[in-house]
């Protein structure tokens, strides 16, 4: 069992005062937190003590103390001395909140959700307010009804998009993931929530992607591999839970004859065999859409369709030159770069996939003529 830093400090104090009572107020004073915070952390402390056959004895007006055999207490001391604490970042807490809401078939009580991430109900409410602003960009919303709980409202596809983007956007070496030799692993989340991710599944999906996507006439960037891996792992989990995406016919018709759809179908067949799930046409189209919208490293596609796209981009560059009065050097390199960037972006727009760019506000401010 894992402990937060504060839970470990509370247990260390109880050990220090073994044989005598210590009040909640005194613990709070020594740890420089409120008594309410100490009350909230006691459940985790008691659960940890129970794993050593120890109990937390309470006495009115006296306080708390550890009760149990000396041998068990010695085991606890050794464990605490060697124990590494786990504290979730705000980003990790948000991922857990959204994952819990997506998985839930009924409204989730605020109290239980707050306990899940180790914060007060008031802190959770503020986090939900922050999340709601981002959720709205994905056509999602939170239903919060007193006495009922919290429910995430929106389509399955948008829920998956938001969760995977939330996870990938917060990628760094000390938070949700770290990237090691082209693989990524969960740290705090994986240790606290064993059911949150299946590392073996992640690595297997990543390896399958590398095998199957090699047939494409372009290479995906590392971040796109990561995003697609997260999407597929979430899809497998949701399909196993009986939750499928729903796409309108227009979107399906626009991708079913593409090369990416052929690759996605073959990939889905293999994933279905391995994980005993069935990817229906909408799920295959969903993978296709994300493939077509993925950022690319290079472009080896010499097809007629791609040459037409290049011609459109050349015309676009010429128009920008005319409006701005500027002339761009090395036109071929510029067109290649814009083709790599704009084609996936247009595919994402056509498929109604939300795209977040943290530089948007800065670009609007520095280059107002672009908007």
Image: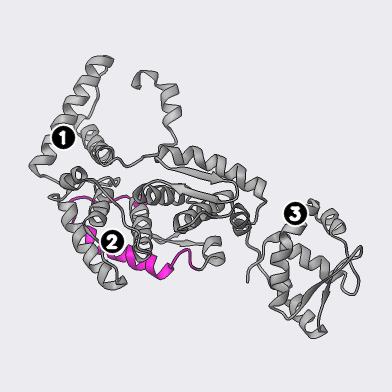
Name the foreground residue: 292 vs 310: 292
Q: Is residue 327 left or right of residue 174?
A: left
Disc number lying in front (3 or 1): 3
Residue displayed at 21% across by 57% down: 281
Does the image show residue 311?
yes
Q: Kindly report the distance in space between the C-alpha atoms of the residues bearing marks 3 and 2.
A: 45 Å
SS for tag 3?
A: helix
Ranked by sequence position, the earlier of labels 3 and 2 is: 3
Neighbour class for label 1 at 10 Å: few (<14), some, many (≥20)?
some
Disc number lying in front (3 or 2): 3
Task: Locate residue 194, reporting x and y percent.
Answer: 51, 68
Ranked by sequence position, the earlier of labels 1 and 2 is: 2
Residue 335 sits above or below residue 6 on the image = above
Write the start and end of the magenta stretch as one range. 195-223
Name the foreground residue: 217 vs 106: 106
Does the image show residue 173?
no
The secondary structure making up most of the magenta span is helix
Q: Which residue is mark 3?
A: 37
Residue displayed at 17% across by 51% down: 217
Residue displayed at 15% across by 35% down: 309
Q: Which residue is mark 1?
A: 310
Residue 338 sits above or below residue 256 on the image = above
206 in the magenta segment:
yes
Q: Is residue 261 left or right of residue 182?
A: left
Q: Which residue is mark 2?
A: 209
Marks 1/2 in contact by CB < 8 Å: the verdict is: no
Q: Kindly report the distance in space between the C-alpha atoms of the residues bearing marks 1 and 2.
A: 27 Å
Where the N terminus falls, by quadrant?
bottom right
């Amino acid at each position: 069992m894992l402990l937060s830093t504060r839970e470990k400090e509370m247990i260390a104090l109880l050990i220090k005062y073994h044989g005598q009572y210590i009040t909640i107020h005194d613990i709070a004073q020594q740890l420089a937190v409120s008594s309410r915070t100490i009350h909230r952390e006691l459940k985790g402390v008691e659960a940890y003590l129970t794993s050593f056959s120890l109990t937390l004895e309470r006495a009115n007006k006296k306080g708390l103390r550890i009760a149990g055999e000396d041998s068990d207490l010695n085991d606890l001391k050794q464990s605490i001395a060697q124990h590494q604490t786990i504290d979730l970042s705000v980003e990790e807490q948000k991922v857990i909140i959204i994952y819990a809401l997506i998985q839930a078939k009924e409204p989730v009580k605020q109290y239980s959700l707050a306990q899940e991430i180790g914060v007060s109900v008031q802190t959770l409410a503020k986090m939900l307010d922050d999340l709601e602003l981002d959720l709205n960009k994905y056509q999602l919303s939170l239903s919060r009804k007193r006495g009922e709980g919290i429910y995430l409202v929106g389509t399955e596809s948008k829920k998956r998009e938001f969760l995977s983007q939330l996870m990938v956007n917060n990628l760094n070496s000390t938070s949700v993931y770290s990237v090691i030799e082209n693989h990524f692993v969960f740290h705090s989340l994986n240790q606290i929530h064993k059911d949150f991710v299946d590392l073996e599944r992640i690595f297997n999906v990543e390896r399958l992607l590398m095998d199957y996507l090699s047939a494409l006439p372009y290479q995906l960037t590392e971040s796109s591999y990561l995003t697609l891996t997260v999407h597929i792992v979430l899809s497998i989990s949701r399909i196993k839970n009986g939750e499928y995406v729903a796409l309108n016919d227009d979107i399906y018709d626009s991708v079913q004859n593409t090369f990416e759809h052929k690759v996605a179908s073959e990939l889905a067949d293999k994933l279905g065999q391995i994980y005993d799930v069935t990817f229906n046409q909408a799920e295959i189209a969903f993978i296709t859409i994300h493939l077509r919208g993925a950022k690319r490293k290079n472009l080896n596609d010499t097809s007629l369709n791609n040459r037409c796209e290049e011609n459109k981009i050349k015309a676009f560059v010429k128009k920008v030159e005319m409006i701005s009065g500027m002339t761009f050097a090395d036109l071929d390199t510029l067109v290649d770069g814009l083709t790599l960037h704009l084609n996936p972006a247009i595919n994402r727009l056509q498929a109604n996939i939300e795209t977040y760019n943290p530089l948007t506000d800065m670009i609007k401010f520095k280059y107002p003529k672009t908007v």
